[in-house]
Amino acid sequence: MTWNAARHVALTVRGTTVLRPPRSVVRFLYGHSMAPGDSARFRRTLRMLRDAFEFVSFGAAVTLLRDPSPPPGRYLAFSFDDGYVDNHELVAPLLMEAKATACFFVTTGFIGCDEKYREHFLRSVVRQPPTRRPMTWRMVEELVEAGFEVGAHTVDHPNLADLPLHEAELQVRESADELERRLGRRCRWFAWPFGTAAHFPEALIAKATRRFDGIFSAIRSRRQFAYAGSVINRDHFEPSWPMSHVRYFAFRQTRRVA
């Protein structure tokens, strides 16, 4: 059995047998993209999650997580990274149907880009299928008008740890500046590309915490905070995943400690 097949079996078994999430938890789930054929599955997944959690806005989830004495309950917030057109055409309508919201972390250089940039971005940067396309800036504006939040995800989606520090700072700052210019509101949230500790230089932490109200990783939330409490960890899922896999990561135990 291959590693992927073994992982699929393990997540299916564990996700099927876990009955409920922790008694009190604030969970952040993040994904990237979905195909039209995944709509029915994502709708069922959202129904399952709504039965287990209270859906809250991204900002409300941050406030609840940081509260030293939060009200008891199970709270869930969604986010989606990169800025694919299906986030506007497919993901957002299904979230609205389920009375959920989300924060869309967009790579600003990808939004409304030309064909050459798009092909390079998909092939060499994020290694995603060549059929995926970016949102336009008007689509991003429409998400905000519909009540969704938008956060910064750098300009070009680099591994920030591979860049000289001043270039990494520019990728973060110019992404937020462009969002603020386009959307006419402060950019409160930042998630770094690839999302692990290996992709984010610690020297950026202090600058980023001064600029943003929240910084988000892609580090699984066995601990809900990283970097001594400066970063909030998110759990990965995708709309195409089997419901049992989503259940496993959404329902498993977590710790608030940094």
Image (cartoon, rainbow, N blue to C red):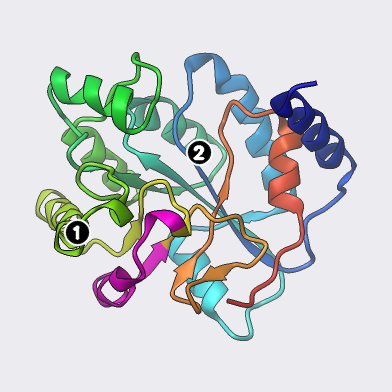
Residue 9 screen position, x and y as percent: 82, 29
Asked if residue 202 is among those painted magenta in the image, a careful observer would answer yes
Q: How many marks?
A: 2
Q: Which residue sits furthest bottom?
A: 68
Main secondary structure type of the part rendered in magenta: helix
Residues 219 and 98: in front is 219
Q: CA distance from mark 2 to mark 1?
A: 39 Å
Please name the residue shown 47% across and 54% down the image.
196
In the image, taking residue 213 as reference, residue 240 lies left or right, namely right
Q: Which residue sits furthest left?
A: 181
Give the answer, above or below, for where 40 lies relative to 17: above
Identify the secondary structure beneath mark 2.
helix
In the image, taking residue 100 as reference, residue 13 lies left or right, namely right
In the image, taking residue 131 as reference, residue 72 lies left or right, namely right
Residues 217 and 159: in front is 159
Residue 250 screen position, x and y as percent: 69, 50
Identify the secondary structure beneath mark 1.
loop
Residue 152 visible: no
Please name the residue shown 24% across and 61% down the image.
187
Q: In the rendered view of the protein, which quadrant contains the N terminus?
A: top right
Residue 90 visible: yes
Q: Which mark is residue 164?
A: 1
**Magenta-drawn segment:** 198-215
Residue 97 screen position, x and y as percent: 52, 35
Q: For mark 2, does the 10 Å Cα neighbourhood hold few (<14), some (14 to 19), or many (20 or more) residues? A: some
Residues 163 and 61: in front is 163
Q: What's the amino acid at mark 1?
A: Pro
Read off the residue under disc 2. Answer: 95
Q: What's the amino acid at mark 2?
A: Leu
Please name the residue shown 87% across and 48% down the image.
19
Front disc: 2 or 1:
1
